[in-house]
Amino acid sequence: MPATEPFTPTVVEREADFWRLIWQSVDLLRFLTPVGRCRTLRCVVDRLNSYHVTIDELAASDARPDITRYTDWFVSCVHIALSFDWNRFEVKVRPMTRSSSGCLTLWSDRSVQTARGT
């Protein structure tokens, strides 16, 4: 996303809700999202961990011939990881009160809109 576009923060009410986010089912990531199998973030992370592979290995076309994948997508992931600046973000945990549930909110210093998962 270009630096001039606003960042939309993600509000997650509970950790369990975060792990239930769904990955899109696409061929280029089929080893992470097999047809007919769970595609929640928790399932995808568990599946990725079961391969004992790094993002750098997934980005390298000559590494891990046992995993069919679209390496260009993982090259992008490597670039994102290398350039990610945690100093631009705050993690705020709002405590639970009578009028609201506790939630985790990721904010940036850009304009803000709120998105709530279901």
Image: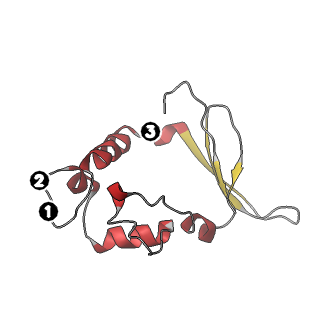
Q: Residues within 10 Å of mark 3 (few under 14, many from 20)?
A: few
Q: At x 26% / y 57%, what residue is drawn? A: 69
Which residue is tagged 2?
Answer: 62
Query: Residue 61: x and y, percent?
Result: 16, 51
Which residue is tagged 1?
Answer: 65
Above or below, 36 relative to 69 = below
Quadrant assignment, res 45: bottom left
Decide which of tag 1 and tag 3 comes sooner along the chain: 1
Nearest the camera: 50 or 87? Answer: 50
Q: Is residue 102 left or right of residue 110?
A: right
Q: At x 42% / y 68%, what residue is drawn? A: 44
Quadrant assignment, res 17: bottom right
Are dots 2 and 3 in contact, CB under 8 Å? no
Give the spatial CA distance, label 1 vs label 3. Answer: 32 Å
Q: Residues within 10 Å of mark 1 (few under 14, many from 20)?
A: few
SS at circle 1:
loop
Nearest the camera: 78 or 35? Answer: 35
Please tell me whether mark 1 or mark 3 is closer to you in this view.
Answer: 1
Q: At x 71% / y 40%, what residue is drawn? A: 113
Q: Residues within 10 Å of mark 2 (few under 14, many from 20)?
A: few
- The outermost residue toward the top is 4
- The outermost residue toward the right is 99
Are dots 1 and 2 in contact, CB under 8 Å? yes
The image's mark for residue 85 is 3
